Amino acid sequence: MSSKKPIEKFRPENLAGMPSKDAKNRQQAGNSQTQPPMSIQDGLSLAIQHKSAGRIGQAERIYRQILEVEPNHPVALHLLGVIAHMAGQSDIAIQMIRTAISHAPEYLSAHRNLGNVFLDLSRFDEAIESYGKALAFNPKHAVTHANLALALHNSGRIDEAQDSYNCSLNLDPEIANTHCNLGNMYLEKREYDAAVASYQKALAIQPDFAQVHCNLGSALKNQGLVDEAIAHYNQAIVLKPDYADAHNNLGTALQKLGHVIEAANKYRKAISLNPNFADAHCNLGNALWSLRKLEEAAASYRMALDIHPSMTEAAGSLGSVLLAMGKTNEGLALERDGFGVINFDVRKGVVYNFGKST
């Protein structure tokens, strides 16, 4: 299942009502003619046009020029912070957006985008706080409720997240991402019927949503509808050929139907797209073990463990393969660490303990 992402990423702001002052006439370097005066409001509007067209550098220059004239201008500070975050300079982004808020405490878009920065950084508590402040100024903003839900979801506050997803959809039922993320939550809770319903609503809004096709496939596979799952995995790949998760998940469905060689090829494709995909390496190991290619299976499990050392399934399976290869000591140790230790207690019966025995 794909990782969850915020719905809205720094949508251009409506600047109406923000303070503006006329900028001083400025002379362009190397040009003897003085440019006609432009108000800060006009400059902001022009910068947003540049950003919307992908001309980020030109937008950034205008914001900096505005700050030369008015150093504490909230909108310029905020939107320059947005650009900093897009460039991977998140610490600078946080500082600039917070400065904007200090000069305009009720600037709800700045609170919302600060929440988006924190969400991207997995600083969920701070994201929740920022979204809460934005909603205090506009409690009917559907996207903010959806992003708050995502932060709550990632924090493990599932009931609150579900309430926020539903609040968002009550305000705007046409946001495909919200239906997708709600479906992801249901999928994690193993409420597969509800997950399928949410994904289907997302696809009714956005039929070419590759992530939804992939996650719907996972829900259907867990319902035992493997052929339908395969159809959605394939559709996800048609829409996004480099989608490693979809190739890996298609492999698991094919293997469930006994098509082990095809499954192995799908795992290899996923790995070629994402060499650090530990699950795909482990799944390839499972397929190779089924094909009795023990050396290759062991190599795949070791690769999974190199990427994710605490991956118990890979450790246990590697141990079992090594035992089958006659490498008893290493095999027993890995199998024990991965699958646990079975002890018999005359008072308790069989006791299954994960990890090393003491």
Image (cartoon, rainbow, N blue to C red):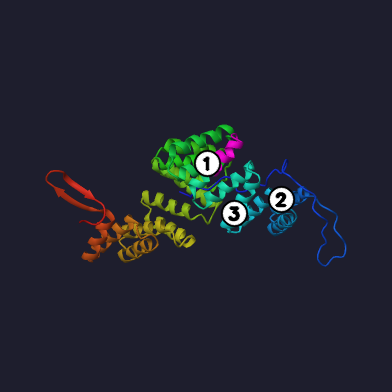
Name the N-terminal-most of marks 2 and 3. Answer: 2
- Residue denoted by label 1: 148
Q: Which residue is mark 2?
A: 48
Q: Between residue 84 and residue 158, name the one nearer to us.
A: 84
**Marks 3 and 1: CB-CB under 8 Å?**
no
The image quarter in which residue 264 lies? bottom left
Bin the neighbour count of mark 2 within 10 Å (Cα to Cα): few under 14, some 14-19, many 20 and up.
many
| Mark 3 and mark 1: Cα distance apart in space | 21 Å
Work out whether 116 lies above or below 90.
Answer: above
| Residue type of the residue flagged with mark 3 | Gln
- Crowd class of label 1 (few under 14; some 14 to 19; many from 20; radius 10 Å): many
The answer to whether marks 2 and 3 mark residues whose Cβ atoms lie closer than 8 Å is no
Q: CA distance from mark 2 to mark 3?
A: 21 Å
- Up-down relation of residue 51 to residue 151 (above or below): below
SS for callout 1 = helix
- Which of discs 2 and 3 lies nearer the camera? The answer is 3
The amino acid marked with disc number 2 is Ile
Looking at the picture, tell me which residue is in the foreground, 115 or 182: 115
Residue 128 lies, in percent from the top left, at 51, 43
Residues rendered magenta in the picture: 130-146
Residue furthest left as drawn: 346
For the residues marked 1 and 2, what is the alpha-carbon distance in whole angstroms?
Answer: 26 Å
Instruction: Compare residues 18 and 42 and report the one nearer the observer.
Output: 18
Residue on which disc 3 sits: 95
